[in-house]
Image: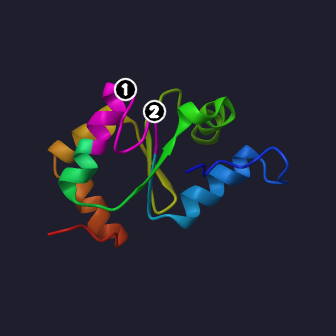
């Protein structure tokens, strides 16, 4: 499953990222996949999202140096993972964990109209 733009397309990496962020309610740019996270921080965010019961799209930045660098420029944030909800950059592992522990992440999903499993 390769969701990354091929070199022969006209879409820039920034356009690809913008399209993914805007066309999916919840997007996680991560190292590895939701099934097989390749770093502890990505794994923690996956566990939190799975625990909350929200559907999300995971994009593996390890498949493309262009994507890995592009997402950092797109968000102006230096680290991976990066979570987006309804087109809005939420943050990385520490921010997501703190929001989850405070109940703010669940509240954010509710306010944004993102369906979570009961």
Q: Position of residue 113 (x, y in %)?
A: 34, 73
Q: Which residue, given by chain and number where applicable, does mark 2 sit on?
A: 31
Please state the extent of the stretch shown in magenta in the rendering.
29-46
Q: In the figure, is residue 62 to the left or right of 90?
A: right
- Image quadrant where one finds the C terminus: bottom left
Q: Is residue 27 above or below residue 68?
A: below
Instruction: Please identify the quarter of the rendering in which residue 76 is found.
Output: top right
**Helix, strand, or loop for circle 2?**
loop
Q: What residue do we see at 34% from left, 69% from top?
A: 114
Foreground residue among 101 and 60: 60
Q: Residue at x 18, y 52 (%)?
A: 51
As helix, strand or loop, the secondary structure at mark 1 comes to loop
Residue picked out by circle 1? 39
Residue 37 within the magenta-colored segment of the rendering: yes
Q: Label 1 to label 2, Cα distance in Å?
A: 6 Å
* Mark 1, other Cα within 10 Å: few <14 / some 14–19 / many ≥20: some
Rendering coords of residue 47 (x, y %) = 24, 43
């Amino acid at each position: 499953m390769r969701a990354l733009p091929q070199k022969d397309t006209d879409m820039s990496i920034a356009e690809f990222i913008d399209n993914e962020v805007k066309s999916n309610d919840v997007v996680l740019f991560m190292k590895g996949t939701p099934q097989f996270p390749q770093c502890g921080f990505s794994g923690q965010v996956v566990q939190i999202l799975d625990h909350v019961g929200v559907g999300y799209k995971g994009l593996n930045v390890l498949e493309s140096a262009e994507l890995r660098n592009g997402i950092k420029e797109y968000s102006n944030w230096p680290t991976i993972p990066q979570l987006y909800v309804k087109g809005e950059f939420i943050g990385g592992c520490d921010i997501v964990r703190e929001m989850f522990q405070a109940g703010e992440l669940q509240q954010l999903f509710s306010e944004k109209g993102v369906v979570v499993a009961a």
